[in-house]
């Protein structure tokens, strides 16, 4: 089964969605994605939150209930809330809700992940078999190294390679931090979100090869997964182009390795 491990749906709201650039300032829903997945030979996807609200989580769950190809949902819940366990018990009734994400990249505190109240919340996720997606920028990676080491029983995945800047040579610090994170076997990494960290108009396949190499060498073929980041990717590339970047790199890999990267690992991690 070929799975897109990272994409989004939304009904565009100009007040809420100020981060969006012009090409994606519109609704993107399953009926928009379905023909794209079919054209690219995809069997399903994981829908990931874009807004930090429980309404967003329910919105995605309602879509997943209606569309079979939405195999799982990564939602949002306030991991710092006093009533978190009550909310986790509530969401545990939804089989397609696989985990949660917080938009840590938007937090001013580089060590936000290590806050006591946040860590207390994360410590409850494994009890309900929920995953956690780590969305950060490279300067936040030192905290990620500490964070993942605190929860050896929690399934984590780093989104978008932690967003290195593909417009220039990748930093040694980013690579070293990713290797340190990969040392923890409970952590996976999504090969996603690359084109929007490159030159949107003039990116080339070879721009991404060094980053893919670092991640695949560090995590191995059994702990990385393809994600399109559709529709955000449309700022810089069509879906087929995004998929082609990774497919070109792994063209010489074994059939088994390709199968894991393009779907098997997502199925294992998210229990699809």
Image: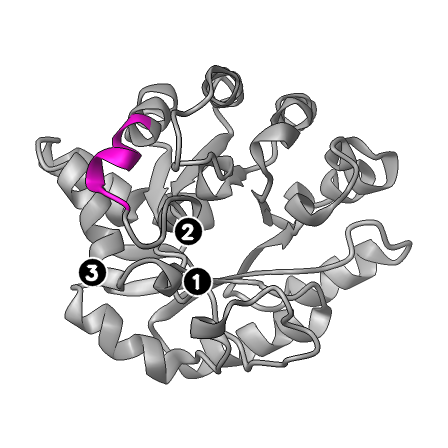
Which element type, helix, strand or loop, lies under badge 2?
A: helix
Q: Which residue, given by chain and number where applicable, does mark 3 sit on?
A: 240
Picture quadrant of residue 252? top left
Point out the image quarter for the C terminus: bottom left
Is 206 contained in the magenta span? yes
**Residue 42 x, y percent position in the rendering:** 22, 63
The residue located at (39%, 79%) in the rendering is: 30
Looking at the picture, does residue 201 appear above or below residue 187? below
Q: Which residue, given by chain and number where applicable, does mark 2 sit on?
A: 196
Q: Do the residues under discs 1 and 2 have CB atoms within 8 angstroms?
A: yes
Residue 199 seen: yes
Q: Which residue, given by chain and number where applicable, does mark 1 sit on?
A: 232
- Distance of mark 1 from mark 2, alpha carbons? 8 Å
- Distance of mark 2 from mark 3, alpha carbons? 15 Å
Looking at the picture, does residue 87 appear above or below residue 155? below
Q: Do the residues under discs 2 and 3 have CB atoms within 8 angstroms?
A: no
Mark drawn on residue 113: none
Which element type, helix, strand or loop, lies under badge 1?
A: helix
Lower sequence index among marks 3 and 1 = 1
Point out the image quarter for the N terminus: bottom left
Q: Which residues are magenta?
A: 203-210
Q: Is residue 246 left or right of residue 190?
A: left
């Amino acid at each position: 089964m070929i799975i897109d491990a990272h994409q989004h749906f939304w009904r565009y709201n100009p007040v809420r969605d100020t981060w969006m650039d012009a090409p994606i300032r519109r609704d993107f829903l399953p009926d928009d994605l379905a023909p794209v997945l079919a054209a690219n030979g995809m069997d399903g996807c994981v829908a990931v939150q874009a807004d930090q609200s429980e309404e967003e989580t329910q919105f995605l769950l309602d879509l997943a209930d209606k569309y079979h190809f939405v195999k799982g949902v990564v939602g949002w819940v306030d991991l710092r809330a006093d009533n978190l366990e009550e909310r986790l018990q509530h969401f545990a009734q939804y089989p397609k809700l696989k985990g949660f994400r917080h938009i840590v990249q938007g937090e001013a505190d580089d060590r936000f992940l290590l806050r006591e109240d946040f860590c207390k919340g994360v410590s409850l996720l494994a009890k309900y078999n929920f995953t956690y997606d780590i969305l950060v920028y490279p300067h936040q990676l030192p905290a990620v190294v500490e964070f993942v080491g605190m929860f050896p029983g929690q399934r984590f995945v780093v989104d978008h390679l932690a967003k290195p800047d593909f417009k220039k040579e990748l930093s040694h610090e980013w690579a070293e931090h990713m290797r340190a994170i990969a040392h923890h076997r409970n952590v996976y990494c999504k090969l996603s979100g690359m084109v929007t960290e490159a030159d949107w108009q003039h990116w080339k396949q070879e721009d991404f090869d060094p980053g893919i190499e670092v991640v695949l060498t560090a995590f191995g073929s059994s702990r990385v997964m393809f994600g399109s980041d559709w529709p955000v990717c449309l700022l810089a590339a069509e879906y087929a182009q995004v998929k082609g970047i990774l497919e070109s790199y792994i063209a010489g890999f074994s059939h088994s390795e390709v199968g894991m990267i393009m779907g098997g690992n997502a199925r294992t991690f998210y229990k699809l």
